[in-house]
Amino acid sequence: MRFVIYLYRRFLPVFFGSIFFFCLVLILVDLLMNLWSFISQEVAPVDIMRVMVLYIPKTLSFSLPLSILFAVSYTLSDLYAKNELTAIFASGVSLFHFTLPLLILSLVLSFGLFFFEDRIVVPTYAKKNELQDSLLNQTKSLNNDRIVIITNRGEIVYKADYYNDAEQRLVGFFVVFRDENKNLVKILRSDSATWNETYWECATATEYVVEDTFMRAYPASQQTMFLLTEPPETFRNNTIDVETVSVTEAQTYIERLSRAGLPVAEATSQYYKKFSFPLIVFIVVFLSIGLSGKTRKNVLLISLVLCIMAAVLFYVSQMVTMLLAQFGYVSPFIGAWFPVILFIVISIVLLKFART
């Protein structure tokens, strides 16, 4: 128990100091990137402070993995350099058992990071972007053009030249109806269609029905229009970055993409990444334990270099596997989880050959 208390006393000040430093750097970088825009729009200092405060949870999320990696690496390297770990090993305590409290802490923080990201970071970061866009007079239009939506397992295909979100109106509207074998049944055409609470209502529409080997034109029936139930949200220009929304919102977005017949590999891999990425806290602690004790000189510098190298390697490998998942070379699950599994294995190997 004394070893645990002593280890935390050496580790926690470095850890909290690192978090404060990295958060401060990220906040200042974000402020400097937008400072000229704030000045040109004559944004009040109190509003700028509100933007910075809303950005704090996101900086904590960014800073936690790097901070804990540096803190563990520096603490253990310092103990090696001062021969304190040599005395601990001589007493019969192995490196794994001595650092086990740090591994347990990192595992708890990994689970905590997932809920912190989903419940706090996502909504505060969304409010930050919304407030910043409002202060800088930057608005995003939900209008859309050249739209093709596939629904009902491919049996109904919508096509429109333009969607007006304010009026909830589609212009240059076509709908293709197919049977369960994807054979053409009929086509509905209208100059425009307006959302009528439950379906798209066409003022003047024509439907072309396949009869034997011919297509005959008829005025569109009300029964046909009752089938046009795809909601306006599907037609909006509302591409979502899955990483910036909650798990529930990500699920809804992926379901909407699937229903519309759009590619879902990238969104699905980002969805799985929401679960795998928090484990980076556990991985970096495992890595830093294996990397510690490589030198007794320049402890701070070497720890920082090893910290940055390990973090960069993990992020690069994850970026590569996510790209492979996006282009369909690997499954979204593999794209998100393979780097985690790989670096856990690397950490075990490093720990096995660590100096004890």
Image (tube, rainbow, N blue to C red):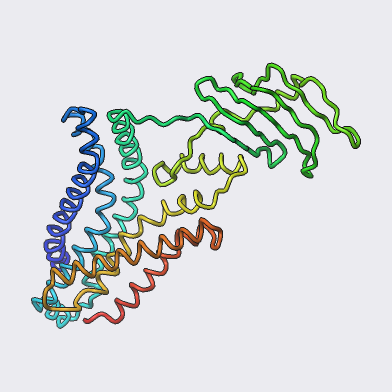
The quarter of the displayed image where residue 51 is located:
top left
**How many numbered marks are there?**
0
The quarter of the displayed image where residue 46 is located:
top left
Q: Position of residue 145 (x, y in %)?
A: 56, 33
Q: Position of residue 282 (x, y in %)?
A: 31, 62
Q: Where is residue 143 in the image (x, y as percent from the top left)?
A: 50, 29
Name the quadrant of the C terminus.
bottom left
Residue occupying the far right of the picture: 212
Residue at image point 27% right, 68% down: 309
Name the quadrant of the N terminus.
bottom left
Residue occupying the far top of the picture: 203
Residue at image point 25% right, 47% down: 59
Q: Where is residue 107 in the image (x, y as percent from the top left)?
A: 31, 59
Say above or below: 320 vs 27.
Answer: below
Q: Image check: 116 left or right of 147? A: left
Q: Which of 190 and 181 is in front in this view?
A: 190
Residue at image point 31% right, 40% down: 120
Say above or below: 289 vs 315.
Answer: below
Q: Nearer the viewer, residue 2 or 35?
A: 35
The quarter of the displayed image where residue 342 is located:
bottom left
